[in-house]
Amino acid sequence: MKNIFSKKKHLWFIPIALLLLAGVYYLPPVHSRLAWRVDDAYSRIKYFFNPPDQADFQLEQTDNFESILATTRAEYSLTLTPVFTRTPTSTPIITFTPTISPTPLPSSVALSGVKYESQSGHNNYCGPTNFSMALTFWGWEGNRSTIGDALMPGNRLDKNGKAGDNDKNVMPYEFQDYITENVAGMTSVMRYGGDIDVLKRLTAGGFPVIVEKGIYELDMLGKVSWMGHYQFVTGYDDATSEVIVQDSYLAGPNFHINYLEFTNSWRAFNYLFLVVYPEERESEVIDLLGALAEPDTAAHIALDRAKKEVATLTGNDQFWAAFNVGTSHVALHEYIDAADAYDNAFGLYSELSTEITSRPYRVMWYQTGPYFAYYYSNRFSDVINLANTTLNDTISKPILEESLLWRGRAYYMAGDTQSAITDYRAALKVHVNWDPAVQALQDLGVQP
C-alpha cells in the first residue's frame, strides 16, 4: 500500500511536464521546426482512421442518375439533344465554324524565350510558378514568389525558410485579377472547351498556354490519388503526337506528353486554359481562338463534349465528364441545370471504387462550380452540406477559404448571420486580406 501512495505522490509531475513540453513546443524557434512534422503526423493519423476517399458528398436533392444516363446514351445514338437541362428554353447546342486562318500549321513548335521555374520548396505552388513563367515569357521581371506572396500569403517562407501550407490552390480568376491590377500592359483570356488543336494554333502563333489539369500519384496511404495541377504548354510535335510542357512539379522543363494522355488528364477541369499576352496583341489571340473566342460559345462547346463523354466513358473519367456538364452550365449562368448536373456527378462519385485508386476527393479544393449552382438555385442547405463534407472529411484541417466563404454565404441566406461571420473570419485566417471575405464582412457592417 505504501508503494502505491508513493507512486501517486509523484503523479503531479505529469501535468506539469506536459505543460512544460507544450510551452517549449510553442517557442518560435522550436515551433517553426516541428510544426510541419506535427501537422504531417496529424494528417496521417486522421486519414488512416477516416480515409478521405470514403467521404460522400451528400445532397438533399439527388435524382436517379442511372435512368438519366440510360436516356443520355439512347439519345446520343441518334442526336445531341441536351439531356441534363430541365429548362425547356435552354439554348440549343449549335455547330460552330471556326474563323481561324486556313494556313497549315507547322508539324512541330518549341517556343524559345521560356524561363523555366520549379515550384520546389513551396507547397501547392504550381499556380504562382506557372503564371510567373507565362509572364516572364513576355519580359516581366517578377518570379513565382512575387505572385505567390500576393495570392497565397499563408504559404510564404518563414524566417527559417520553411514554407507554409495554408492555401491549397489559387483559382484562375485570382491570377487574372492579379495581372489586371499589377502587370501594366498585360492581359489574359480564360476559356473552357480547349483541345489539342487550339493549343497548337496558339503556340504556333507565339502564345504559350496555361492549362489546369489533373494528375495521379501515390498518397500517404499508398493509393493512387488525384490532385489538381497547372502546366505551361510551350509547343508540340505531331511526329510523336506530343505536347511540350514546362512542368513545375516533377517532370521539369520541356517535358513531352502524349496527346491522348494530356487530354485525358485535362478533362478534370473541363479543358480549361488561359493565355497571357500583351494587350496590343489581343486581336491575334482572338483570331487564333477561333470558335472559342466568344465565352458562351466556348461553354456550349464544352457542354456538348461533356454530355457525349458522360455517355461513353466509365469510372473517374465519367465522373469528371458529368461534373463538367455542371461546370459548363455554370459558365452559361444556367444554375438550376447546373445543380441537376452536379447531382448526377456526385451520384456517380458515390459509386466509384476505392480499392486501388482513390476517389478524387480533392475535387472541391480546386473547383467551386457546385457552390455557385446550389447557391443560385436557392439550395442553401446543399451548399452547407457540401462545404461541411469538403472541410471536415476531405482535408485534415478546414483550411479551404472558398468552402468557408460559400458556407458563410449559405448560412447568411438561411438566417444564421453569426455562423456566416465566423466562416468569413475563418477564411481570412487561411487567406489574409482576401477580398471576397473582407467584402462579405463589410456588407454585414462587421470589421474583418
Image (cartoon, helix red, strand yellow):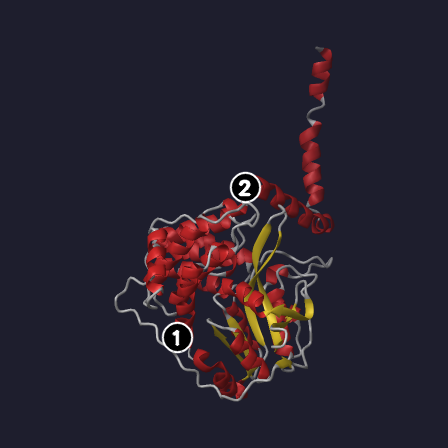
As drawn, the residue found furthest toward the top would be 1
- Residue type highlighted by circle 2: Asn
Q: Nearer the viewer, residue 351 or 441?
A: 351
Instruction: Judge whether 8 appears above or below 326 on screen.
Output: above
Instruction: Judge whether 346 appears above or below 299 on screen.
Output: above
Asked if one can make out residue 131 in the rendered structure from this viewpoint, the answer is no
As drawn, the residue found furthest toward the left would be 88
- Residue type highlighted by circle 1: Asp
Instruction: Judge whether 358 appears above or below 328 on screen.
Output: above
Question: At x 51% / y 85%, what residue is drawn?
Answer: 282
Q: Are marks 1 and 2 in contact (CB under 8 Å)?
A: no
> Which image quarter is the N terminus in?
top right
Label 1 to label 2: alpha-carbon separation: 41 Å
Label 2: few (<14), some (14–19) or many (≥20) C-alpha neighbours in 10 Å: some
- What number of labels is visible? 2
Label whose residue precedes the other's in the sequence (1 or 2): 2
Q: Position of residue 310 (x, y in %)?
A: 42, 60
Question: At x 35% / y 56%, what residue is drawn?
Answer: 70
Instruction: Report the disc number at residue 399.
Output: none
According to the picture, the residue beneath numbered tag 1 turns out to be 296
Instruction: Report the disc number at residue 50.
Output: 2
SS for tag 2? Answer: loop
Question: At x 41% / y 67%, what residue is drawn?
Answer: 328
Q: Position of residue 351 (x, y in %)?
A: 45, 48
Q: Position of residue 438 (x, y in %)?
A: 48, 63
84 relative to 298 in the view: left or right: left
